[in-house]
Amino acid sequence: MRLLIVEDNEQLSELISNGLRTAGFTVDAVTRADQALAAASSNSYAAIILDLGLPDKDGSCVLATLRQAGNPTPVLILTARDGVDDRVAGLRAGADDYLVKPFAFAELVARIEALLRRPGNLLGAQLQLGDLTFDTQTRQASINDQPVLLSVRETTVLELLMRRKGNVVSRKAVEDHLFGLGEVTSNAAEVYVHRLRKQLAAAGASVKIATMRGVGYVMKETE
Amino acid sequence: MPTFRSLTARMTSLHVITILITATIIPLVLFYFMNVAVHTIHEQAMRDQAEWLASNLRRNPDGKLNLELPQNLKAIFSDDYGRYAYAVLDERGAPLLSPTAYAQGLFVSTSGNTIPSGYQVAKIGDKEIAGVSILKNIGDENLWIQVGEDLHHRDVVLDDVVAEFLQRVGWTAIPVLLLLATADILIVRNSMQPLLRASTKAARISPNRLEVRLPVHDVPNEILPLVTSINQALDRIENGFAHQREFIADTAHELRTPLAVLRARLETRADLLPTDELFRDVDVMSRVIGQLLDLAESDNILVHASDRADIYEVCADVAAHIAPLALAQDKSVALEASGTPVWVRGNAELLRRAVRNLSENALRHTPAGSTVELIVGSDATVTVLDRGDGVPVSQRDTIFQRFGVRDPYRTGGAGLGLSIVKRIAEIHQGSVTVDSRSGGGAQFTLHLVAFNDDGTASADNELTS
């Protein structure tokens, strides 16, 4: 997996590159927008990590140029601002994800892996949380390699929660996914989350699904 | 003269004064000229009479003067009729011939020697005689022939004309002048309209509403330079704000990147260093930088009059954002709302920061096992409740001040969060209040301005444009 890092701070660039190489990626690092565009057009990268504050041009311009040229490479934005900036707002449309500085390296790797798992990418047929794994190809959940039998709807909910592990999945998002499987009742999300929770507990999984009233559901590892 | 602040009042008062003066002067001038005309006509008539008399004057062979008047003239000059008078005097002014009432002549010089020529007025008995003296050569001598008319009884027509004229003019002039005054006031008001519009628009300009420009359309040429230069000044200020925002973005980049480097370095030394504590330090620094930038930015952001935000979505977003953090601390987050959008006037991103600051604050103070609640009110309010120790009444104002922290230990907060909330509320013409929650804890409420479908702000119509 070859990644492109566009970051003008050489120390940070080096630290990220070294970390990602350790994590098993091949990494090219550039510091300027024109170098980034040249590299992206001559090589095929699995993902691009793009800093917004570049010396010659704004990172968002690089992204816009790439997208206009029809380059579909997933882009992870590194930004110093989590916020209002029109730039960031515009970026959110073109970029696949963004990470606010400073960030935990593990978070960066997790986000890159998430990008690579998206449809069209080969990596990450397996989702993992605690002792629970989910194979997105065979749609089979297992705990310590022991298969767990789940209904189609429970599996849908599980996949959704595992893809967003540690983050909130809104009740509406759950309902939307269930709706694709046919008629749903108004409390369908609640019903299937409840069933899934019971099934996982019965199988002894080291994960839990927390309900946040009015907010949604979060799947996380139990301590 | 009192000075008026209002241009309209000033112009109107000056106008009324001008009209009053004109209304006084015009009749006087007219009266004067009419009198002059009347006198001229009268003098001419008297002269004609005198010439007529002269042509009928003969000196008899006995040396006596004889005035042979035709019957009609005789009647006019008779004592009975009493209106006209005549006298004939010799060159030195000695009376020669006259009706008995005017034995001394009509117009006699006070010095006694010469007879004044031209139009004269003389008081004789109870009569006021106006007329002329002309010197005529009769036979071989020069004689003064004087003809006058009693002003008290004179040909009424001329005087009546003057009197009548004045009255008519008076009664016609007053309404005309009043009409003129009214028309002028209307003209002044009308020409002030563009200026009034510009003033109304100018009143809406505030540091948060710099996009407003004064209308140049219809503005009179005399005022156009003022309006244009104000608009240019506003352009410059708006540009200044834009530069300021750019500076803030650059500052964020310059401050956060070294922190990212620091954090990445710490991660490579995880085996040697107490990294958990160091990471916490980095997080605190990062948050302080973030809050300072938020604060700086909230001082520079422009909320446009047409901006609207759905506070339900804002709260759902914030709740989802802080939920993992809450879960990690064995706390929970709940959102109470109807589930339908609640539109308020304002900038969604700024409001998200305000709600996030309130929520993070609540999360820090609520004990493990309890829930931070966000309530979206359909009356454009957001209430954030925790189960912490609450805020003593004595601190309820100070906690919104910069570095006026709620807890003395400043656990993870820079003491800026609530001042950011207050600032953002103010930018939105709203407010933030704190109360005790029944059952223990604090209850922060963000009061905003509802955005109606017709594009107006319900609570404050002045905000709309």
Image (spheres, coloured by chain):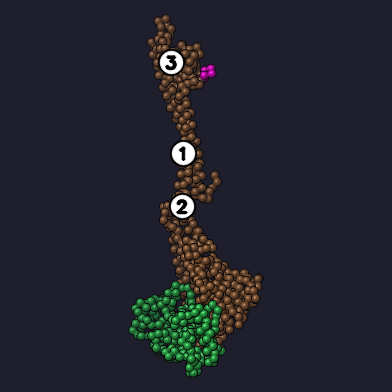
Residue B164 visible at all: yes
Other-residue count near label 1 (Cα within 10 Å), few / some / many at <14 / 14–19 / ≥20: few
Write down the chain letter for disc 3.
B
Q: CA distance from mark 1 to mark 2?
A: 26 Å
Residue B358 falls in image quadrant: bottom right
**Quarter of the figure that contains the N terminus of chain B:** top right
Q: Mark 3 is on which residue type? A: Ile
Residue A126 visible at all: no
- Residue shown at 46% from the left, 87% from the top: A152
- Residue shown at 45% from the left, 60% from the top: B213
**Residue lying furthest top:** B62
| Marks 2, 3 in one chain | yes
| Colour chosen for chain B | brown
Which numbered marker is on residue B145? 3
Foreground tag (2 vs 3)? 2
Q: Image height check: is B217 above or below B135?
A: below
| Marks 3, 1 in one chain | yes
Find out whether residue B124 is within the magenta segment: yes
**SS category of the residue bearing label 2:** helix
Find out whether residue A96 is within the magenta segment: no
Circles 1 and 2, Cβ within 8 Å, touching? The answer is no
Circles 2 and 3, Cβ within 8 Å, touching? The answer is no
Q: Position of residue B97 (x, y in %)?
A: 46, 11
Q: Magenta stretch?
A: B122-127
Find disc 2 in the rendering and name its residue. Answer: B193
| Marks 1, 2 in one chain | yes
Write down the chain letter for disc 1.
B
- Magenta stretch mostly in which secondary structure? strand
Report the chain shown in green: A
Lower sequence index among marks 2 and 3: 3
Lower sequence index among marks 1 and 2: 1
